[in-house]
Amino acid sequence: MQRFSAFSLFRQGLGGHKGWKPQWRNASPKAAYDAIIVGGGGHGLGAAYYLASQFGIRNVAVVEKGWIGGGNTGRNTTIIRSNYLFDESAALYDHALKMWEGLSQELNYNVMFSQRGVMMLAHNIHDVQVFKRHVHANRINGVDNEWLTPEQAKEFCPPLNIEPNMRYPVLGAALQRRGGTARHDAVAWGYARAADALGVDIIENCEVTGIRRDASGAVSGVETTRGFIGSKRVGVSAAGHTSVVLGMADVRLPLESYPLQALVSEPVKPVFPCVVMSNTIHAYMSQSDKGELVIGAGTDAYTSYTQRGGLHIATHTLEAICELFPQFRRMRMLRSWGGIVDVTPDRSPIIAKTPVPGLYVNCGWGTGGFKATPGAAHLLAHTMAKDEPHPINAPYTIERFRDGFMIDEAAAAAVAH
């Protein structure tokens, strides 16, 4: 099997070079597996890898309706951070961040993790109060976060405009220095190659059309466009479509799906040193290794499965970016796109067993999915292997919405992403 480094793929046009071939076997399904993962993104491929590497379950199939990494894994803005407010959230995202720090070494594949810092801007008194609350709560939980004055924020990110005559002047910022970015598709490729080397079957162009159950009601396998595949353990990690897949087993989830937009500029030399986020004007930006300015916008106001959104969302975001960073006003935008995010009532994920024996789910990440990739994958693998949650994901059950034990980051956080 021919090997490629992330850098060589980068030079060949991100896999688009006509001489490029996948690094994993695009396997044909077998009759039965010890476990099936539905969804070939970072979470699904990572779960398969951890099932094989940490729990000794290697007869695993990852089934993906398209190509691996072609969903939200390849459609996000690559931001990684763990400065969430609630104890449960801080534990979950910092678990992931610690795994990010050693992921390239573990996979022997450069996922281009760059801890360049994530700075979150405050534009009004409410923002200041909320972010300072975050700083104190994070420090109690052992998560790094610090408060910056406007002058310190500009020193950390020189392109930032801190003039007092702005529509939304910068009153300060919260900075997590351990936060940063990674290369989204490299994460999928790295997990795919590592899982493949351990014997996992990766089956692309294989859409799940049904979930079969035995006489007792437990899972017995999945119906697909390539035939029936048997397994008594099925994990669903199909961002944007989880409720559709779980509905095949008569499991209802409290999810809504929205387009989430982003866009990139023409590439330029290194000019932007970190990640800057602003929820009040809803825009955030970093610079990729290719030189593009990666700009994130908000979710649309209406539910949809489309992978594009309203033009006014991108327009509003660009207006905000031009005010925050005036030097970029003459930059050209190359392309825009949308991912589909599953959103729960409390904007926190579900990583849990379902009421159907043998059926597990990882969903509802909203805008937080990419930053949690290794942690979410590890916790799903643990839950499937042990048939019980890890202490970190134990609070993230489906039943919390029935029982009222919310982890309400939507209300607590001053930033949606």
Image: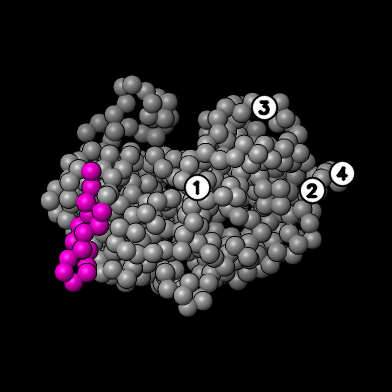
Q: How many marks?
A: 4
Name the N-terminal-most of marks 1 and 4. Answer: 4
Identify the residue at the far right of this view.
165
Disc 3 marks which amino acid? Met
Q: Residues within 10 Å of mark 3 (few under 14, many from 20)?
A: few
Q: Is residue 393 left or right of residue 115?
A: left
Q: Quadrant of residue 166?
A: top right
The image shows residue 369 at horizontal and vertical percentages of 47, 53
Q: Is residue 346 above or below residue 324?
A: below
Q: Tell me which secondary structure the magenta stretch mostly adopts.
A: strand
Q: Residue at x 42, y 69 (%)?
A: 398
What is the distance, in whole Å, between disc 4 and disc 3 at their CAs? 23 Å
On-image quarter of the N terminus: top left
Magenta highlight range:
210-225
Disc 4 marks which amino acid? Asn
Name the N-terminal-most of marks 1 and 3. Answer: 1
The image shows residue 414 at horizontal and vertical percentages of 66, 59
Residue assigned mark 3: 331
Q: Is residue 82 left or right of residue 14?
A: right
Q: Nearer the viewer, residue 75 or 327?
A: 75
What is the distance, in whole Å, between disc 4 and disc 2 at their CAs? 8 Å
What is the distance, in whole Å, between disc 1 and disc 3 at their CAs? 30 Å
Residue assigned mark 4: 165
Name the N-terminal-most of marks 1 and 2. Answer: 2
Q: Residues within 10 Å of mark 1 (few under 14, many from 20)?
A: some
What is the distance, in whole Å, between disc 1 and disc 4 at their CAs? 38 Å
Disc 2 marks which amino acid? Tyr
